[in-house]
Image (spheres, grey):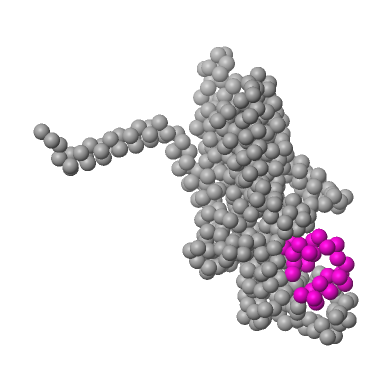
Amino acid sequence: MEESPDSNGNALVLRVRAAFMDWVAVHKLDLGLLMFSILVTLATCIHYISTMQLWTYPGFPLDDSWIHIQYARTIYEGIPWQYSPGVPSTGSTSPLWSIILSSLFFLTDDPVYIIWGTYVIAIVLYATSTFVVGKIAQDYAGQPVWSLLAMGGFVLVPGNTWLMLSGMEAPIFVFLLVLAVFVLDKKDIKYDPILGIILGLAYLARPEGVILVLICVPVRFLMVVWHRELSWRRLGSFLLMGAISLAVVLPWILYCLNATGYPLPDTFYVKVHLPTEAGVEAWNIWWWYWLRSWPFLWVAFGSGLVLAIKGKPFPWLVAWSLTLLYRFTMPYQSLVNNTRYLIPAHALFLVVAITSTAFMLEWALSLKKYADIKTSARFMTVIFIIGVLIVPMQPLYAHQAQTFGNAVKNINDMQVTIGEWIAENTPEDAVLAICDAGAVRFFGNRAVIDIIGLVTPDIVHGNMTTRETLQYMYDRGCDYIVFFDDWFWVFGSYIGGALTTLYRVDLDDNIICGRDAMSVYHINWALTGFS
């Protein structure tokens, strides 16, 4: 007797359901970690966003966030990386982040929806990073409780949620860092090509991603040699890893060479300089403050070496590499804007502290003489991790939520407001000289000359005097300057008498903008000596 179509369909449904239930049973732990990572990430993000909305309407706590979104708009418009029309720029710190954000413009060009869309993308990447942190802890220590503590601590690191919701590239950069750590710990040859892709994308997320190539890949190679696993096939796999990584980053490097003649993005040439004495002193002050406030740093510094000896060096190496890179290239710049550059290093140090503590405990409990105290020892370690490593961060974590709201309000009240005023009160062909290149450009939608040079290659590479900069502005029809009032002395002696103040914003609660007052000036070049 033939089976009916309905019975065949029911049998297929039952087989699919059985296969799904088998898959769930096998991956029950991973699904639990994923759910927990989503819950804790959503909880902290809701906390920060709701706090922000008590201060202001949705936005970002840094003006630089709007630079990424402006680059994203140029990608959508078909003129990628032209920050001003006709002027190719390499000022994007994270071309990968701008490419990701450009997807939003296929759905809407409303700034409000762009902001919320950026939040959604950031939260998804943040939750994914949190999940990978849980997987790392699971691999290192074995017990689910350590994964839960590592994930919970990760989202509570002061500044981490602030940074992830800032509109900056941190969500994709941190995700690639922790993913690289997770894959680096996988010794099988099949992971080498995957690692090549991650390495290339990490560089496109932030130039600092190159530390994975310079530090972690050689260590991975040495570990292969140490375990006597090196062969011609494995050597070829490492070469393939390098080739894949180079293939990923080469288009951006070639574009930078073509646009400016330099292989690195202009953010490097603007921000990286020889450390000054004042910068090193500021670095030392802040680090002593953190070391006095957060015991997890001391634990990470010491016990991270234990992980390294046990063949798990990579989170410790990445955290140290980022810290030392900033110390010797940009100690002061890494501290400004809420120390945003150092937050990923702090987060990784916390992961090292929690996983190394749990790792050492699990190793000790594997010894027969401690077999009868497993439950009490784990309980005491949980108390130690929560009370000594996580709780001391909480006052600053809570303060950072208010800092987030205050900073978003500052950017909305100053740069966003001025950008909207420019859009309504200046000709469409106006050219602006600016010191903050983000929201003024995005909302004003006018061609700009960035006096700092971040998005104007001629400025950063021209080594211009003040007079040469003004001549450059004159030659390009720049009739407006948008500048912090306290910075204007730079130009005052040359064009002070030719300026008219058109619009001004003063902040009485400023914590993030360069100065408390910014103005829009009109220049009457006829009253100057420029021609």
Question: Is 45 situated left or right of 456 in this image?
Answer: left
Q: Quadrant of the C terminus?
A: bottom right
What span is in magenta? Answer: 449-476
Percent x, y of residue 439: 65, 67
Relative height, residue 86 to residue 148 (above, below):
below
Q: Nearer the viewer, residue 141 or 369?
A: 141
Q: Nearer the viewer, residue 372 or 13?
A: 13
Q: Nearer the viewer, residue 179 or 484?
A: 179
Q: Nearer the viewer, residue 523 or 287?
A: 523
Residue 349 visible in this rendered orientation of the protein: no
Relative height, residue 361 to residue 172 (above, below):
above
Which residue is the extreme one toward the left?
1
Q: Residue at x 51, y 33 (%)?
A: 145
Residue 187 belongs to magenta span: no
Percent x, y of residue 248: 62, 45
Q: Residue at x 76, y 43 (%)?
A: 325
Percent x, y of residue 315: 65, 35
Q: Residue at x 69, y 78 (%)?
A: 430
Residue 460 belongs to magenta span: yes
Q: Dividing the picture into quarters, in which one does residue 211 lie?
A: top right
Residue 139 visible in this rendered orientation of the protein: yes
Percent x, y of residue 273: 82, 52
Which residue is the extreme one toward the top?
369
Numbered circles on residues, count: 0
Question: Is 122 situated left or right of 488 in this image?
Answer: left
Q: Residue at x 70, y 48 (%)?
A: 207
Q: Quadrant of the N terminus?
A: top left
